[in-house]
Image: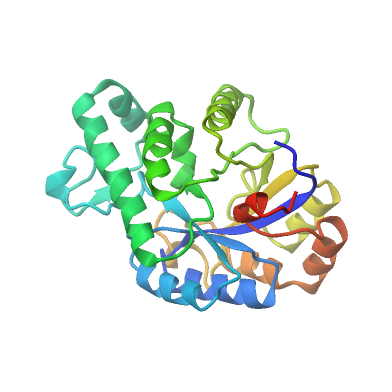
Amino acid sequence: MTHGQLLIVTADDFGLHHDINEAVERAHCQGILNAASLMVSSPAAADAVERARRLPGLRVGLHLVLADGVATLPYDQIPDLVDASGRFGSAMVRDGFRFFFLPRVRAQLAAEIRAQFEAFAATGLPLDHVNAHKHFHLHPTVLSLILSIGRDYGMRAVRLPREAGGPLLLRPWLALLRARLQRAGIAYNDYVLGLSDTGAMDEATLLAAFEQLPRGVVEMYLHPAVTSGAEVGASMTGYRHADELAALLSPRVRAAADRFAPRRGGFTDLHAGLR
């Protein structure tokens, strides 16, 4: 899917913590951030939506949470997916097998995915894109449900987590994802930046990435926040969130972005003639 050079700079985990939301607003207003992926049921989701509504230039998508996070539906509706507190676990391989082989679990998964799309629709924000926390949409069952349910909510773009020179293990799954998105008429990016340096997308990393920017539609995704590590999320102890925010605000990074990727926006711009 080549539309000429377009860079989409996205912040994931929007809504997880107030410090992330603050970073997203600052990085969009003062830096190079174009988009954010919203966790609709996370603790600071309402604050994230309020900020997004006053930032009409910020492209907001749905960051589906199906692992290591809070579910939208209550426990009694999805008891095979979450613990008694309503949280998904982190055993993604085990859960992937359960999604594929157990119809009861798959039905609950479909209900939860629909509930998250419904919650995003209730915000009134335009849906720029869809992706999944920890890239769980690489799982064929999860992807099938996203494609079938997403149509009802105007989904038009999905992240392809394909990094140039990325792990060989992911290539068959990426090829399957890409082929299915093509068949469904869903837009996607050609490459991502941020997969191998998750939690460490500092100024030096971004500057080096711009020097080797692939051609096509590239999504650079980060996890900025005004504080770092476990204070933001228990599973992100080693993440350097504040360094990532500083990189997005860096004049040197902006100069590099203007030089190597002057055309920037969100996935919506793929449908608006920015090709």
From where the camera sits, is residue 200 visible?
Answer: no
Residue 79 placed where, x, y %? 16, 41
Along the viewing direction, whichever of 39 and 201 lies nearer the viewer: 39
Q: Is residue 44 above or below residue 70?
A: below
**Residue for point 19% across, 37% down:** 80
State which quadrant residue 34 falls in. bottom right
Along the viewing direction, whichever of 25 and 272 lies nearer the viewer: 272
**Residue for point 35% across, 42% down:** 90
Q: Is residue 84 above or below residue 263?
A: above
From where the camera sits, is residue 177 visible?
Answer: yes
**Quarter occupied by the N terminus:** top right
Residue 58 placed where, x, y %? 58, 67
Residue 158 placed where, x, y %? 54, 43
State which quadrant residue 97 falls in. top left
Q: Is residue 20 left or right of residue 45?
A: right
Residue 67 placed where, x, y %? 36, 44
